[in-house]
Amino acid sequence: MSQGTLLYAQSGGVTAVINATASAVITEARSKKIKVLAARNGILGALREELIDTSKESAASIAALAHTPGGAFGSCRYKLKSLDADRAKYERLLEVFKAHDVRWFLYNGGNDSADTALKVSQLAKEYGYPLTCVGVPKTIDNDLAVTDTCPGFGSAAKYTAISVREAALDVAAMAETSTRVFIYEAMGRHAGWLAAAAGLAGENAEDAPQIILLPERAYDEAKFLAKVKQVVAKVGFCVVVASEGIQTADGQFVADAGGATDSFGHTQLGGVASYLAGKVKAELGYKVHWTLPDYLQRSARHVASKTDWEQAQAVGKAAVQFALKGHNAVMPVIVRSSDAPYHWKIEAAPLSKIANHEKKMPAGFIRKDGFGITEKARRYLQPLIRGEAPLPYGRDGLPKYVTLKNVAVTKKLPAWEG
Amino acid sequence: MSQGTLLYAQSGGVTAVINATASAVITEARSKKIKVLAARNGILGALREELIDTSKESAASIAALAHTPGGAFGSCRYKLKSLDADRAKYERLLEVFKAHDVRWFLYNGGNDSADTALKVSQLAKEYGYPLTCVGVPKTIDNDLAVTDTCPGFGSAAKYTAISVREAALDVAAMAETSTRVFIYEAMGRHAGWLAAAAGLAGENAEDAPQIILLPERAYDEAKFLAKVKQVVAKVGFCVVVASEGIQTADGQFVADAGGATDSFGHTQLGGVASYLAGKVKAELGYKVHWTLPDYLQRSARHVASKTDWEQAQAVGKAAVQFALKGHNAVMPVIVRSSDAPYHWKIEAAPLSKIANHEKKMPAGFIRKDGFGITEKARRYLQPLIRGEAPLPYGRDGLPKYVTLKNVAVTKKLPAWEG
């Protein structure tokens, strides 16, 4: 008789360490003799009954998964609505779960995914199907409630701080006859965590980045340009880090990529750095360069934070342990007990406290002038980028990233008519 | 009696390893008891008599310089014209050199700088001033003649190949419901070396990047869009790497940043990826993301190539040795004797063969369809990104980059009226 299977799925934008979580989930489940299926392309694979048999992967591949960026089983942006509005989909999920004896469902994502996991757990209860649902935290946006930080953020934060420090050395060397102002566009729709992390690149107000623009503060163009001018006069150059989600006082995004929206209904942003660069050039006349790292910032496993990498694995391992103990509708969260030395542990938090919440930066993290971070923010952020996650390189000079076999299990149900 | 001083200056865009060259120059000169001055902001510092006394820096600082990106003494974009047109400036340089007993002048830059070093050597000869001028190669563009490769290129190439591979894993995981086409804009005005290096990220035609757009081939929009469509249909997604300098058949740059020109008279480019992304979205309807790494690609010391780093130091050391032996108007170049294993050595080449030349990619390096690199290109490029240059990190999770004291020597001449 089967003892049940565990279904793992990845959701939303992938990170440098979400596969480290996956690796830990599979490793922990294997140690408990539990079979792990992985949904191809997140919840979509569950709906379509496209399930990958992870037992076909070697121990070496699962170990290598821990240092491979991207989403090894495929992720998706696919938002399930309320139980009423999308009832047929939720019921289909339960059918698939039953067909494959899925008793534990681990959904690895952000607050939308926590919401989905919560609703699935509610429907299973309603139908009397014994299912334990666990959300597993992941997002470079660092905007999940309750948890101290979100796996994926620390590595993107480390990438950001290092890239800004390196580019600033470049700009400093060239400013006299070339670029005076350099603008770095960081991801972050509504919360400025990644842009804030760039603040770790410098130690005092004159170090780059001299200006950080956060969505938590209204963008005031006149004030911004005056500050750029002041910094260039004093330092000789100015490095600006702008969050993609900055808005004017009336709530307008400073720039968006043609106003497209993704399937979660979020506006697809982009172009803030380009906009700011144009303004600086036109209004102040400085030569300006800008960068849009885009996906590079969330996939840069080559410069991942060891702290983040360890936490990504810890939440994966804990998620399996919670699931097997029957802790339903919870998420393993990171609880900080000390900044320096940084002490943390994993605890279970109810998904209801996390689903659809969005954690913005506390006001106390933002400098009074709105253009930088405080010591308090620094104490919070600093441990998260600490340590270098190990990474094996091949003789070809490239990291040894693994590609899984991803063998699908045989379907047992009629095709989904979604 | 003074035995003469050596003047070192950095020119043009800085790289992840130009300071490794500087470190080797100073280390080698110190071992020969030769005093090294460094010009602040390249040739401008020489004209202004802003000279840094490198003997004030500790051995530890000079050692740390070898792993610090940017340009430690400042660089510049400042092009001297012909000896006739800019005679007063060249004569001023000689005055400064005489005032500080400069007998050896090392100019670390690209082909413009090689030209300047050559002209200075000619003027010194004309005036009977005993000066040995040595050009030291540096450019991420890899476009210097004679040398097998240019220090700075291998590290930018490694950054490019790794970043593209990582971003491709991200896109592959998300393509079903999110981004189908990802466009990476690589530096390179007229030569597509860096974009070509992205080809190392994949092994066969279906691996990302599936399309590379090089300035060596005319950009044909219909052909490009048809290829994107074909790749998406076959692979599910498409990663495009575009060189900033791509042009249409009639010689128009596909995009430029407002048509600004830098002080060398080169058009300041940018915006190719943005342009292509707009086209792909409008014509094919795919969701598209794009990145403009800009300075990040040339300052990313955190992912530098060990081969490149060793070559950067080797040319610095050889430059001092050539100078002290009186090899005038030469540049230490890298000579390859074997691809696999990669064997190289340093030889002296006349500056006249390098000044103002620009090495484009050989036709044999470009795939017949124009959208990728050949095996021949791969054999050339592969060794250049090999190995990981060591880098110490601090407890704060950031690389330990050094800031020099940069103490100026006392001026002996009237201010320059340039």
Image (cartoon, coloured by chain):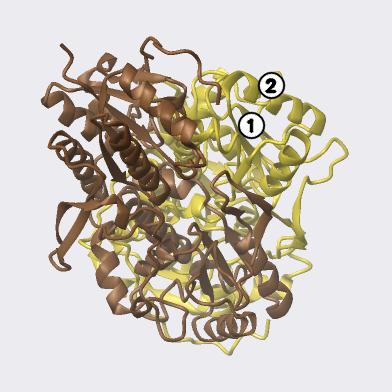
Chain colours: A brown, B yellow
Please name whichever residue, A82 or B187, is drawn nearer the observer in this view of the structure. A82
Q: Is B230 or B5 nearer to us in this picture?
A: B230
- Are callouts 1 and 2 both on one chain? yes
Label 2 packing within 10 angstroms: few (<14), some (14-19), many (20+): some
Q: Position of residue B395 (x, y in %)?
A: 20, 61
| Residue placed under numbered mark 2 in the picture | B230
Q: In the rendered structure, which disc, 1 or 2, sits on the residue that comes first in sequence?
A: 1
Q: Is residue B126 visible?
A: no
Q: Nearer the viewer, mark 1 or mark 2?
A: 2
Q: Residue at x 73, y 47 (%)?
A: B275
On screen, residue B298 above or below B181: below
Which residue appears farthest toward the right when viewing the image? B250
* Horizontal relation, residue A327 to residue B292: left or right: left
In the rendered structure, the answer to whether residue A242 lies left or right of residue B254 reads left
Q: Amino acid at mark 2?
A: Gln
Chain assignment, label 1: B
Distance from the alpha carbon under mark 1 to that under mark 2: 15 Å
Residue matched to label 1 = B212
Label 1: few (<14), some or many (≥20) within 10 Å?
Answer: many
Q: Chain of mark 2?
A: B
Query: What residue sits 22% from the left and 28% below the top?
Result: A26
- Three-letter amino acid code at the position of disc 1: Ile
The label number, if any, that marks residue B353 in the structure image: none
